[in-house]
Image: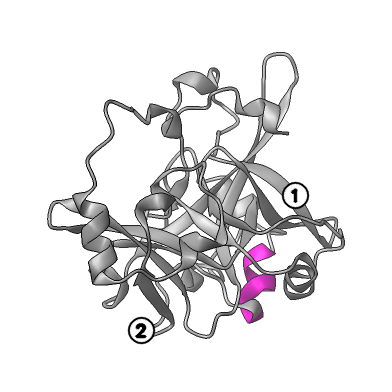
């Protein structure tokens, strides 16, 4: 799956790569988490646009968002069939600019975070599907989920799922939702090629959403990993908020 990611490229560089007409200016983000507003590139009236959407898709037919499961990922194998995604994959596909993401691997009974990124350091375009949820009072909320696929042989060592990344030469094909035919985009929903991504262990500081600084990306040594593992656990602090909406409408 993909539960945290990073956006560090300069806004001008991302605008040039993704080709949207807006000129947003935003700071680097080192720990983007579900329910936060994230950038999404989409095609509207024949042009690419930059939009902020809540990470966590809400299908249009949901009556009460607080009682609905937060959908941060959409599995490529079932995205054509699941009621929450089957319309969006045909009509509302987008790209999420990123520079890498985090994944957690079980190591000696604990979860060790890793930072994963392109071997050449280039930005990524995560495949995404989005929906606009309209509330009972007419309020609108744009929401999005990242498409995932079964991990390839190398990345499977960390997790069995990976975000689908779209190559720049396939951006146009992925974003073209003018017809209902989706045969052209099916081959794009696969894992990265062997060796396309590299990774390294990082501090467990990334586990806390409030930590959002460039130190999170730094590799840590085996000794540092052991030292973090040896730290006493802090008393009772449940993180249920990570999967709830918590008044996120105020973010927009």
**Pointer 1 local density, CA inside 10 Å: few below 14, some 14–19, many at least 20:** some
Q: Is residue 87 visible?
A: yes
Per the rendered image, the range of residues in magenta is: 169-175
Would residue 52 appear left or right of 160 to someone viewing this image? right
Q: How packed is label 2: few (under 14 Cα within 10 Å), some, or many (20 or more)? A: few
Image coordinates of residue 125 in percent, x first then y, are 59, 67
Please determine whether, in this image, residue 176 is positioned above or below residue 251: below
The quarter in which the N terminus is drawn is: bottom left
Which residue is rendered at x = 52% and y = 41% of the image?
A: 210
Quarter of image, res 137: top right
Rendered view: 245 above or below 176: above
Q: Determine whether, in the image, residue 166 is placed left or right of residue 80.
A: right
Q: Is residue 197 left or right of residue 248?
A: left
Residue 64 location (% of width, % of height)? 53, 18
Where's residue 14, x and y in %? 73, 69
Precedes in sequence: disc 2 or disc 1: 1
Mark 2 lies on residue = 194
Which of the image's four quarters has the C terminus?
top right
> Which residue is at a point 26% across and 62% down the rendered structure image?
225
The verdict on residue 170 being magenta is yes
Q: Residue at x 50, y 20 (%)?
A: 66
Q: Is residue 111 visible?
A: no
Measured in 3D between alpha carbons, the distance from the residue under mark 2 to the one under mark 1, in whole angstroms, is 32 Å
**Circle on res. 51:** 1
Helix, strand or loop at label 1? It is strand
């Amino acid at each position: 799956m993909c539960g945290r990611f990073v956006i560090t490229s300069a806004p001008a560089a991302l605008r040039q790569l993704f080709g949207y007409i807006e000129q947003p200016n935003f700071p680097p983000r080192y720990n983007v988490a579900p329910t936060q507003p994230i950038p999404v590139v989409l095609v509207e009236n024949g042009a690419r646009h930059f939009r902020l959407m809540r990470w966590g898709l809400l299908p249009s037919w949901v009556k009460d968002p607080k009682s609905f499961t937060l959908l941060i990922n959409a599995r490529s194998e079932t995205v054509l069939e699941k009621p929450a995604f089957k319309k969006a994959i045909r009509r509302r596909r987008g790209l999420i600019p990123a520079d890498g993401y985090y994944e957690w691997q079980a190591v000696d009974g604990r979860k060790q975070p890793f930072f994963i990124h392109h071997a050449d350091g280039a930005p990524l375009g995560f495949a995404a599907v989005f929906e606009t949820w309209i509330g009972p009072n007419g309020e609108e909320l744009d929401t999005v989920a990242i498409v995932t696929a079964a991990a390839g042989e190398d990345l499977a060592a960390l997790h069995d799922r990976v975000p689908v990344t779209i190559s720049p030469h396939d951006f146009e094909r992925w974003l073209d939702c003018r017809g209902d035919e989706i045969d052209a985009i099916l081959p794009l929903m696969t894992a990265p090629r062997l060796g396309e991504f590299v990774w390294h262990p990082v501090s467990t500081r990334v586990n806390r959403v409030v930590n959002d600084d460039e130190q999170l990306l730094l590799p840590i040594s085996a000794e540092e990993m052991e030292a973090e593992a040896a730290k006493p656990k802090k008393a009772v602090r449940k993180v249920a908020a990570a999967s709830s909406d918590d008044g996120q409408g105020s973010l927009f």
